[in-house]
């Protein structure tokens, strides 16, 4: 059992301290932080797509320090992840944080003959890690969402992550404590026993400005927050950054979180400052910490942390509902009924379809008939029935199980469309199919299946040689 699992089992509040693998020097790591047990975490490709892999970076740190390795699915497939699991096991690394990851900086959209960048979904990674066994599995969750569909889509997916086998949840970095508590309430209401940790960071003006200007995926920094930080800096009160971080950590402890994931605080002088504030406030009760938190943010109602939501209410159109119903009926008749399966099997169980021209013609027919209707991209493993007939390939990351954390007010992280998972969440409510989005774990598409006919694969899926 890893030390982290033991802290969880013994309900010991712990601090996971993040170290980027792109750091030029190796900083000292400890097993305790402000009196709390601590674990080091190594992030995966945060600065660049070519940062040192966490599996290699661990070699620079002492063996006796327990470590949590991040694995981001960006630019990876399931086979690579399974290999990673074997390597982690061989190095006795048992704590994993499995993420889909933000947009790869060198993302390729598949245009002009280049191959499209693929993203291994966190849900699929959790399923594989669980199946492998022996890991303490963490997932990320972003509670800082501010439209109904976006919130629903996040929580639907969280059900799946838990069903797939997550042991603990680390929130996105954020300052809206009401949203964090909503996440905690969700877990309690559903009797989920997964441990909850909050990601925290001493938010300096420079970091806040960087995140706002760069629009770092999924992180909500508002102009009102920047304004306060600017005023503080001008008044020589920048140390309040650490006072607030200490308070956030202590509030999480009082609320019963299992710990925090501390980002951007790897330098000894930063850690000392933060620890000194934790010491200073350690004996305050929850109400006093919260009071002080609000006072330091000069905000009683949490308004400062919430983006301005435009008054637009996206509705599900009648056309979308009718399309869903028609496709659902067709799917049931052609692919699910006994007769449909029998006929399909009879047609495709012929050697003829293995001949190149026939296979090519079949693929083209499938694409022609489905692309204009649902945006099909010939993935070879049709998942439409589990995605309310909204093709997962129309998500730039190709996510089928739900959204990543990077959306902003229903907009896709890529900025060029509405998030398909928000569209799906809205439709699911309208046609009363939310259970499909919460419970149906959709398998990853192996690379070798892509570019083959999903029709043929569907009808022959029980055949030993296909
Ligand atoms: S899930 Fe795959 S086969 Fe189905 S419509 Fe989308 S790309 Fe085509």
Image (cartoon, grey):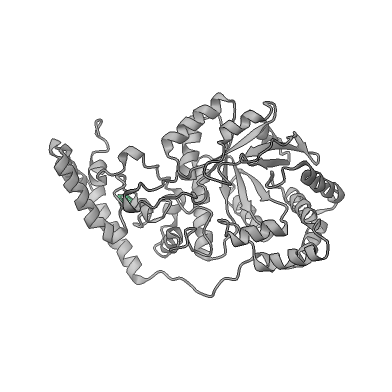
Q: Quadrant of the N terminus?
A: top right
Q: Is residue 189 left or right of residue 157?
A: right
| Residue 200 coordinates in the image, percent (x, y) | 69, 50
Image-based side of 49 in relation to 319, left or right = right
Q: How far across and down, in percent of the image, does residue 136 sit?
A: 59, 35
**Could you tell me residue 185's position as x and y percent?**
63, 54
Judge whether residue 321 can be spotted in this image.
yes
Whether 90 is drawn above or below 254: the answer is: above
Quadrant where the C terminus sits is top left
The residue sitting at the top extreme is: 90
Residue at coordinates 36% horizontally, 52% vertically from top-left?
393
Q: Where residue 179 sits in the image (x, y, percent)?
A: 64, 59
Looking at the image, residue 381 lies above or below residue 30: below
Q: Nearer the viewer, residue 265 or 8?
A: 265
Q: Residue at x 43, y 37 (%)?
A: 78
Residue lying at 35% horizontally and 55% vertically, measured from the top left: 391
């Amino acid at each position: 059992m890893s030390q982290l699992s033991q802290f969880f089992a013994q309900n010991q509040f712990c601090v996971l301290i993040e170290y980027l693998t792109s750091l030029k020097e190796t900083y000292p790591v400890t097993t305790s932080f402000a009196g709390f047990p601590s674990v080091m975490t190594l992030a995966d490709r945060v600065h660049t797509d070519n940062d040192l892999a966490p599996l290699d970076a661990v070699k620079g740190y002492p063996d006796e320090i327990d470590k949590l390795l991040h694995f981001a699915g960006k630019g990876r497939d399931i086979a690579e992840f399974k290999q990673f699991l074997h390597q982690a096991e061989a190095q006795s690394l048992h704590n994993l944080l499995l993420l889909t990851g933000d947009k790869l900086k060198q993302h390729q959209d598949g245009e002009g003959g280049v191959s499209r960048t693929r993203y291994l979904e966190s849900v699929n990674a959790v399923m594989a890690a669980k199946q492998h066994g022996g890991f303490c599995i963490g997932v990320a969750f972003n509670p800082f969402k501010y439209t109904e569909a976006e919130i629903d889509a996040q929580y639907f997916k969280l059900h799946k992550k838990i069903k797939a086998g997550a042991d603990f949840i680390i929130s996105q970095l954020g300052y809206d404590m009401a949203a964090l508590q909503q996440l905690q309430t969700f877990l309690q209401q559903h009797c989920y026993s997964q441990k909850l940790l909050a990601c925290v960071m001493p938010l300096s003006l420079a970091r806040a400005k960087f995140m706002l200007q760069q629009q770092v995926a999924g992180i909500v920094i508002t102009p009102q927050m920047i304004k306060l930080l600017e005023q503080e800096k001008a008044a020589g009160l920048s140390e309040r950054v650490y006072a607030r971080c200490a308070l956030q950590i202590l509030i999480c402890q009082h609320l019963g979180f299992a710990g925090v994931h501390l980002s951007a605080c790897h330098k000894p002088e930063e850690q000392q400052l933060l620890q000194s504030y934790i010491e200073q406030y350690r004996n305050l009760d929850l109400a006093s910490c919260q009071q002080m938190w609000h006072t330091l943010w000069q905000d009683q109602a949490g308004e400062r942390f919430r983006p301005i939501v435009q008054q637009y209410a996206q509705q599900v159109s009648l056309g979308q509902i009718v399309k869903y119903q028609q496709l659902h009926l067709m799917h049931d008749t052609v692919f699910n009924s006994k007769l449909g399966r029998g006929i399909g099997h009879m047609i495709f169980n012929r050697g003829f379809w293995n001949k190149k021209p026939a296979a090519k013609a079949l693929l083209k027919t499938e694409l022609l008939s489905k692309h204009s209707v649902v945006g099909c991209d010939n993935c070879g493993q049709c998942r439409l029935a589990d995605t309310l007939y909204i093709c997962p390939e129309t998500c730039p990351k190709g996510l089928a199980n739900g959204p990543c954390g990077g959306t902003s007010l229903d907009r896709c992280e890529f900025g060029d469309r509405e998030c398909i998972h928000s569209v799906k969440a809205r439709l699911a409510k309208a046609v009363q199919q939310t259970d499909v989005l919460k419970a149906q774990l959709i398998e990853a598409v192996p690379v070798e299946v892509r570019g083959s006919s999903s029709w043929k694969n569907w009808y022959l899926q029980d055949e030993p040689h296909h």
